[in-house]
Image (cartoon, rainbow, N blue to C red):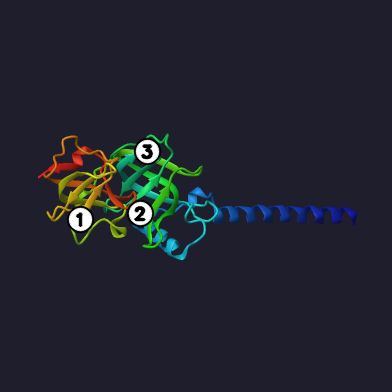
Amino acid sequence: MKRSIIYLLVILMGVFLLSGCLTKEKVDEENGDENSQVVSYSIADIKAEIKDNYVKGTAGWDTADPDVVPLKNVKDVIVVYDASNYGYIYGVTSDGTGIYFKVDKTLDIEMNDTFDATGRPYYVERDKDNGYFEYRFTLAQNDSDVSTSIKGTIPWDKADHLTMNNLPGMDNLGNLVIFEGKYLGKDGYGHFVFDLNDDGNADITVVKYSSMPANLETGNLYEVKGVVGYNYGFKIYVGDSSFVTAK
């Protein structure tokens, strides 16, 4: 009788252990590793999600809080403005849609690099009264990951063409843009200003940190390619002097 009880206990223990292992395997299979569950999103989708959380005022979305904002993956992003030495770049995908990427200053990346990355979206409020905020994506947190591949071709054919009816703003923030304008010189802060409709007034400002040609001539007409950013107002960021041509 005593031996039968011992046998029964051994069998029950075996069933218990086996059940525990199967349960753990099932949970592991369902949950998986966090990074393995990171889903790839288009930059357009990520910007829409940022806007939604800005409007709602969702806590944590203004800081990319890891406890609130899930990891996201973006693919085939082309660097169109490299300020990685200062902790940021602008990158776009094949549809011309782009975003500000916060990066570690030691990241080895440069103009025209194509990269895949895992990070978290967030926003930075710029002008509360007008509802202006900057779409951002951080690659500078501990669980971020960036891998570069071959040089990419910037899809200028997908760029927004700026006119007096389509000036830089929230609708094209982060995106590729092209405009033609008469160069008026520099403003009091050192930014480059351009007149779109030949009325002598500054309509578009190119941020002073841009890689502009050294031989710009006041009064001449130029075609300028860049990306829309925000620096005390909406400005164009030009990543290479070759993006500016005389007309």
Q: Nearer the viewer, residue 50 or 10?
A: 50
Quick check: 68 above or below 206?
below
- Foreground: disc 2 or disc 3: 3
**Mark 3 or mark 2, which is nearer the start of the sequence?**
2
> Which mark, by number, is residue 84?
3
Other-residue count near label 3 (Cα within 10 Å), few / some / many at <14 / 14–19 / ≥20: many
Q: In the image, what residue type sits under mark 3? A: Ser
Image location (x, y in percent) of residue 40: 40, 53
Image location (x, y in percent) of residue 50: 41, 58
Q: Secondary structure at mark 1?
A: loop
Q: Which residue is drawn at the image coordinates 16% and 35% (left, top)? A: 215
> Which mark, by number, is residue 162?
1
> Which mark, by number, is residue 43?
2
Q: Residue furthest front?
A: 188
Q: Is residue 112 left or right of residue 28?
A: left
Q: Nearer the viewer, residue 64 or 73?
A: 64
Q: Which residue is drawn at the image coordinates 19% and 37% (left, top)? A: 213
Image location (x, y in percent) of residue 201: 18, 53
Q: In the image, what residue type sits under mark 1? A: Leu
Other-residue count near label 2 (Cα within 10 Å), few / some / many at <14 / 14–19 / ≥20: many
Tell me where residue 242 sits by quadrant. top left
**Mark 1 or mark 3, which is nearer the start of the sequence?**
3
